[in-house]
Image (spheres, rainbow, N blue to C red):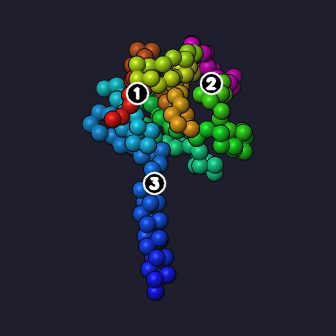
Amino acid sequence: MLRRLVCTGVLVFGYSFLAHTQSPTDGRVVKSAYENTYFHFLYSWPQFLQPYDMNSLQFAKKPESGNEFLLFSARQGDEPYGIVMVAERMNVPTQHSSGLKSSSDLMDRIARFRPEQHVVIQSRKNFTNANGFVFDELDYTEDGAPSSAIVLQIKNFLVVAKCNAKSAKDLDEMNKSVTAIRIMK
């Protein structure tokens, strides 16, 4: 009887622990900001963007490695411009790679565009924002459209923001909003 009671207690404790385990996707929109409690950051998007239902995004099938997590998306009205934010777990081998080693490793891979993409790289920079986050930023045009990829490392993840904009001014605002990510208290 005591053994059964102890086993039941262990199972209840185990299930309650699993129910409270955090995930990289533990984020939510609060007013005009996205807050992620797993990574402990707060992101405020430009006013011309609105959060977009991530279930309507058409992404490839979820990877078997379980190393990619869709965090947030915002769009400029009904137009195909906006931001998608994902997290990639580092050092997870996949079918095509031994895993991402660092933000510069990911940026090197992103910068290898195929000729049919008609990409022109504008700039690549690495810097630390006022909140202590280190960013790698790649600005480019794809078929003439201003775009960027911005990466920061948090824990053993790379948080990646992919921005595409109608104008260079809009892209500049998106990039500034991403690189202003701050620590959530």
Report which quarter residue 88 is drawn in: top right
Q: Looking at the rendering, in which quadrant would you find the C terminus?
A: top left
Above or below, comparing residue 87 to residue 82 in the picture: below
| In front of the other: 122 or 64 | 64
Classify mark 1: helix, strand or loop.
Answer: loop
What residue would you read off at disc 1? 181
Q: Which callout, 3 or 2, points to the residue nearer the camera?
A: 3
Q: CA distance from mark 3 to mark 2?
A: 30 Å
Span of residues in magenta: 110-123
| Residue 5 in sight in this render | yes
Q: Is residue 40 magenta?
A: no
**Quick one: label 3 or label 2, which is nearer the N terminus?**
3
Q: Are marks 2 and 1 in contact (CB under 8 Å)?
A: no
Whether residue 118 is in magenta: the answer is yes
Q: Residues within 10 Å of mark 3 (few under 14, many from 20)?
A: few
Lateral position of residue 96 relative to residue 34, left or right:
right
